[in-house]
Image (cartoon, rainbow, N blue to C red):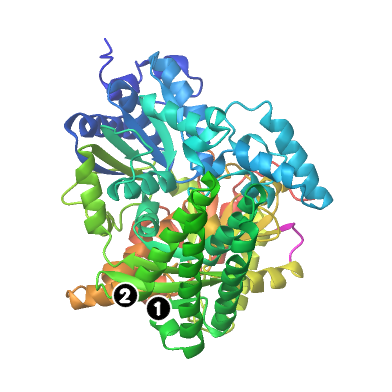
Amino acid sequence: MIDHEDAAALLGAEGPFARELPNFAPRAAQQAMARAVQHAIAERETLVAEAGTGTGKTFAYLVPALLSGERVIVSTGTKALQDQLYFRDLPRVRSVLDARLKMALLKGRANYLCLYRLDQTVREGASFDRAQASQLAAIRAWSARTRRGDRMELAEVPEESPMWPRVTSTPENCLGVECPFYDDCHVVKARREAQEADLVVVNHHLLFADLALKQEGFGEILPGASAFILDEAHQIPELAGQFFSQSISARQLAELAQDSLGECNGVTGAIGLVLEPAEALQDTVRRLRLAMDTLAERGPFHMLEANTAIADALHEVREVLAAFTDVLASQAERSRGFANAHERAALLSERLDRITERESERDVRWYELFPRGFALHATPLDLAAPLRAMREQTQAAWIHTSATLSVAGSFDHFARQLGLDDPQTLHVDSPFDYATQALCYLPPGLPDPAARDYTDRVLDAVLPVLHASHGRAFLLFTSHRALRRAADLLRERVPWPLFVQGTAPRHRLLDDFRASGHGVLLGAASFWEGVDVAGEALSVVVIDKLPFASPDDPVLQARLEALEQSGINPFMGWQVPSAVIALKQGAGRLIRDVHDRGVLVLCDPRLTGKGYGRLFLASLPPMPRTRELADVRSFFGDMVLAHPPE
């Protein structure tokens, strides 16, 4: 007899999932995780659960979430995973459980069509090129038939199209209840549905934006919940840093000027007052960016203060922004748009003053440069304290899960980053048979990764592997410079189609790679995780170097110094654990299915030449290791290729 309140039993051999879902295989690891999640929700506990690839962790947390009778928020790492969860996984679980609960999908406002800004863009009658005009026409036609207004529905307009920012809103330029389209607003509808739902699917960006705002007293987008389930939780430490930071960018200042000028259209005489200070703001921002041209892409704030020309330009931006704020104040009562612009200007002015003048030892002040802009930040040195306060405020269960949270079996690094004090922990292994499905090849004779010809030597070592596998490979790099060098070398040396990050959007590269059958894909950071290519199209994953974080990251530098001062070895206490988790993500691209077979090629000689290399190897799935190329050839010789080379 099945206990219908027992999440683990429902996922067992006698349960409804085994009966009703084709290809569902009961897994002990999945049941163990479901039991732990159910207990954490009931007891309002904090749980850290590492579930190896193929465990079925999505069902392992959705089943207890739907059984709990509590309001639950599930947060994922990306919008694509959010859609997969909401449109594919949740309906299956809900149907099997016959759960009559309200579900909602909620994304950040930039994902929803703004009817007011679409109307403005059409009225402006700006001269768009043919492609943009065609995209705007497609958006207008879609706006008449969409119920949700989620831009993911409109595949024919690329995600990177410059039309999207014109027809979506930001927190700064939203008119709120005074918007003439408020009653039909897609953002308002989505938030209302979320407020009324029993289970809400969000992404980490939205979750932390809301929780960080709630702390500052701006109210909450997300409903109060009894449990928060964070999938892909290894991303949380970095994302949290963004949301507990104070930041201001050249783009925000430029958009403030542009939106203020746009608002003059309907207000008599406003252009005479606003035009000059708006253009002055745009000019001073451009001059500041020009003065910063000599700097590295990112660095500590004192680099700006030490350069007289930059310091003067920064002072001028502050003065001009303050003056522009005063001008907008004089127009604030003339229209809702001007009132909004004044609020934005005042907020940006205050934020800029805080970042430039801040003396707090708890913050790291730093800058970053973009091709046409810049951003200034003040980031908390220690995220543990604000994250701990945020969790305590919710009085909820917090469940963190991912395939990559531990370092050689220990969760200490992850727990320390998030300020998790003595959490419940669970590790469940992947059901895949790595001993027969995979092989780890450590090419012998490679030089120190700092050697000038390192990438060339890596390719010399990897080419015989690619010939043995007939392509079908991911080559993952820790830098874009190495990626570009490898692409240049490979174009002349391999017969298979090459797919290089940066030459097309990520989703298109992956689709083309899958379709090619024998492709070789070269990727950097964004291809190390969240990429799923099951089957024979991917049979080799190559990693060029251990993925240590960039040493020129000013926030990392400050954190490492703080660790050292507190008596912790920063290299072993932070840099190595972070790199281990990143390596596990990259290695996880290889085996995605019980039928997959493949070779993981780890090129970095520090894995065997340095003591800490053992931590990396001990953290990988239990696959056999070799230094012999003959073993790789033998491994592929044993594989029956579905599409043998011509």
Magenta part of the chain? 494-498
Q: Is residue 347 left or right of residue 328?
A: left
Q: Nearer the viewer, residue 616 or 308?
A: 308
Residue depicted at 15% across the width and 50% down the height: 422
Tag nearer the camera, 2 or 1: 1
Residue 475: quarter of image: bottom right
Residue 464 in percent (x, y) is at 64, 66
54 displayed left or right of 63: right
Q: Residue 326 vs residue 516: left or right?
A: left
Query: Main structural element of the magenta stretch: helix, strand or loop?
Result: loop
Q: Which residue is mark 1?
A: 300
| Residue located farthest toward the top when viewing the structure as drawn | 1
- Asked whether the residues under the numbered discs 2 and 1 touch, taking CB atoms below 8 Å apart as contact, a structural biologist would say yes
- The dot on residue 558 is 2
Q: Position of residue 102 (x, y in %)?
A: 40, 20
Q: Which mark is residue 353?
A: none
Q: Please give the name of the residue rendered at 77% of the width and 49% of the height, measured from the top-left corner.
A: 132
Precedes in sequence: disc 2 or disc 1: 1
